[in-house]
Image (cartoon, grey):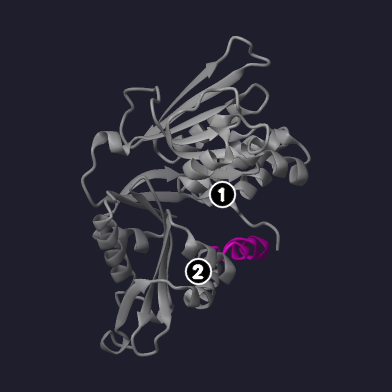
Amino acid sequence: MSWESSKMKIRKAEPSDCIPINRMMEKLIEEIYARESAKVRKVLKANFTKDAFKELCRDKQSLLYVAEDDKSGKPVAFLYGWLFQNVFTIYWIFSEKEYRGKGAVHRLLRTVEKKLIEDGCYKLEMYAYAEENRFLDFAEKLGFKKGVLLKKNMFGVTIQHIYKYIGECAAEDKIKKIKIVGEAGQGIKLLSYTLATLLAQLGNEVSLNLEYDSAVRSGSISADLIYSDDPIDNPIIDEADILIKFTRKRDWFPAKKLVIDEGFCGDEAPEEMTCSIQSRKGTLYGFENVAISRFGSKIFINMIALGRILRYIGINILLLNIKDVLPKKSLEKNIEAIKYGFKYRDDI
């Protein structure tokens, strides 16, 4: 098939594209994870059903594009990624075999890059198998550079981080700030340490500052977690990009995005924590209710929250060797809670 007979147009995916994208995703999983067990591939496919792609199409932070064959009118390649703080992480990019070498992937990347530049994005990044030299060489020709090498991930393979700066960005805009506020016994320390460790694994500069009330057993605890491409000068947060709040006892903290347990919403909630304020400023997640009903104890609130945070900031949990950074006690349930918060579907 010549390039002339396979002209394509690049466009944003629509709900009607979800079935062909799902088929391509299954081919991608079979190809990329060929050395893994059939069970692993089956679980991965459960995360990318046609209904899952419809959900992705509706998400404001996700970007899903297809290359459509002009002659047949069918999608023959796709690109999916996640945008957070003007950094776009490409999760998946795939082309049908008969269209490889015809420019589909190149045109997808070029089109998406142009749109992102218009929207103020300054950086593209993605992760690839370290031994996929052909793809890494191709990415290098497109201007990508090699970042951190992840020697282990969820499936025990080596992953290469690659990135490309596509726009200008002030140093302060590269800094991401997460404020976590809770009470003793809610696992705030474990949550913040785990998140900081995972972000460091991915090559970020990370700063974590914990603050305790004098009453350690019954007092409150807060964590200032900052990560950036560049060294961090100030470890204290005055305004957070994300506020994770598990307690009513602390004063309100300024933040661009709020994630809070829906259990705080009710007749007994103080005025500054009313539902109307919550719904305008952020998202209500039933951490405590789910922790008890699904995992048997509210101690798993922090791990469900961790999964939510990782999804929101665009960190693919498939890349992370989570087991190494969690305590051995209740390890499997903690991992299950993280996956649940991330919406990783182990259930088939």
Q: Which mark is residue 218?
A: none
Locate residue 198 relative to residue 89 in the image: left or right. right
- Quarter that holds the N terminus: bottom left
Identify the amino acid type marked 2.
Leu
Residue 12 screen position, x and y as percent: 37, 70
Residue 288 screen position, x and y as percent: 69, 38
Give the camera-side residue of 113 and 255: 255
Q: Quadrant of residue 70?
A: bottom left
Residue 274 screen position, x and y as percent: 57, 36
Is residue 205 visible in the rendered structure shown here?
no
User: Which residue bears the numbered disc 1?
Assistant: 156
Binning the other alpha carbons within 10 Å of mark 2 as few (below 14), some (14 to 19) or many (20 upward) gives: some
Which residue corresponds to the image point at 50% horizontal and 43% vertical from the top-left? 282
Which residue corresponds to the image point at 64% horizontal and 60% vertical from the top-left? 40
User: Which residue bears the numbered disc 2?
Assistant: 28
- Is 35 part of what is drawn in magenta? yes
Which residue corresponds to the image point at 61% horizontal and 64% vertical from the top-left? 41
Q: Kindly state the secondary structure of the residue where label 2 is placed.
A: helix
| Highlighted magenta segment, given as a residue range | 33-49
Residue 64 screen position, x and y as percent: 42, 65
Above or below — where is 46 with respect to 122? below
Give the camera-side residue of 319 and 85: 85
Locate residue 131 relative to residue 248 in the image: left or right. left
Q: Nearer the viewer, mark 2 or mark 1?
A: 2
- Is 34 part of what is drawn in magenta? yes
Is residue 284 visible in the rendered structure shown here?
yes
